Image (cartoon, grey):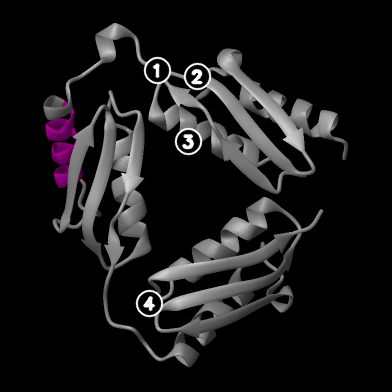
């Protein structure tokens, strides 16, 4: 697929998604790498634009350079915004109480600890959905017991084999002290995300070293 075709397909996907106002988004493509530039009205919309681009066949990587700009009526001072973020985090049962947040110029910094990656991601999502947030900087540490490396590897490989979207034979898994290294080749970015998500779901994983190649 040519760069022009990929650029057009991503632009069409952004236009197709009702959660995104694509009028102020510029798209460029270079050998599978798609760059998004322009402005959107919320941090969530910025993330949705990235997800939309990643859905397009032929995309290997998305460089999300979109900026969040609010109407004056949606602007909030940092103290008020921090209170709203903390309240949102507290009300979500998936977010552990060990996570804290600070705000500087609309940028939320998350700190603290979590036992699972899904808890960390939930905190990011919750904070990013608060009106007035322009960016989320995640410094949450993953902590917990570390199982035997061979047990982690087996658990992830079995997850790959159960997943209808993945070719388990094309992927390799290695585990050392909570760090899982993934390697191999997949046929789409969607497959790549399925593999990474499966690795994060294994008990004791605190880091995923993603070396998977997306080859169309």
Q: Residue furthest top?
A: 72
- Which is closer to the viewer, label 4 or label 1? 1
In what element is the residue under mark 1? loop
Q: Which disc is residue 47 wearing? A: 3
CA–CA distance in space, label 4 to label 2 = 39 Å
Residue behind mark 1: 69
Is 39 left, or right, of 128 in this rendering? right
Figure quadrant of residue 75: top left
In what element is the residue under mark 4? loop
CA–CA distance in space, label 1 to label 3 = 14 Å
Residue 185 pos. (x, y %): 74, 67
Q: Is residue 82 magenta?
A: yes
- Which is closer to the viewer, label 4 or label 3? 3
Residue 30 pos. (x, y %): 77, 38
Do we see residue 172 in this rendering? yes
In what element is the residue under mark 2? strand
Question: What residue lies at 35% left-to-right and 15% top-to-bottom?
Answer: 70
């Amino acid at each position: 697929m040519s760069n022009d075709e990929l650029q057009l397909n991503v632009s069409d996907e952004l236009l197709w998604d009702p959660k995104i106002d694509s009028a102020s988004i510029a798209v460029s493509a270079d050998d599978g790498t798609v760059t998004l530039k322009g402005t959107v009205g919320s941090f969530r919309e910025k993330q949705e634009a990235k997800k939309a681009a990643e859905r397009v066949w032929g995309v290997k990587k998305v460089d999300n350079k979109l900026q969040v700009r609010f109407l004056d009526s949606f602007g909030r001072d940092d103290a008020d915004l921090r209170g709203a973020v903390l309240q949102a985090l507290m009300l979500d049962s998936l977010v552990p109480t060990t996570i804290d947040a600070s705000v500087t110029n609309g940028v939320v910094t998350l700190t603290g600890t979590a036992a699972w990656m899904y808890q960390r991601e939930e905190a990011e999502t919750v904070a990013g959905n608060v009106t007035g947030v322009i960016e989320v900087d995640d410094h949450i540490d993953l902590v917990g017991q570390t199982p035997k490396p061979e047990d982690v590897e087996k658990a992830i490989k079995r997850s790959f084999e159960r997943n209808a979207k993945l070719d388990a034979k094309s992927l390799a898994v290695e585990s050392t002290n909570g760090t899982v290294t993934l390697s191999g080749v997949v046929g789409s970015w969607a497959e790549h995300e399925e593999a990474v998500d499966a690795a994060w779901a294994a008990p004791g994983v605190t880091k995923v070293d993603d070396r998977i190649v997306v080859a169309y």
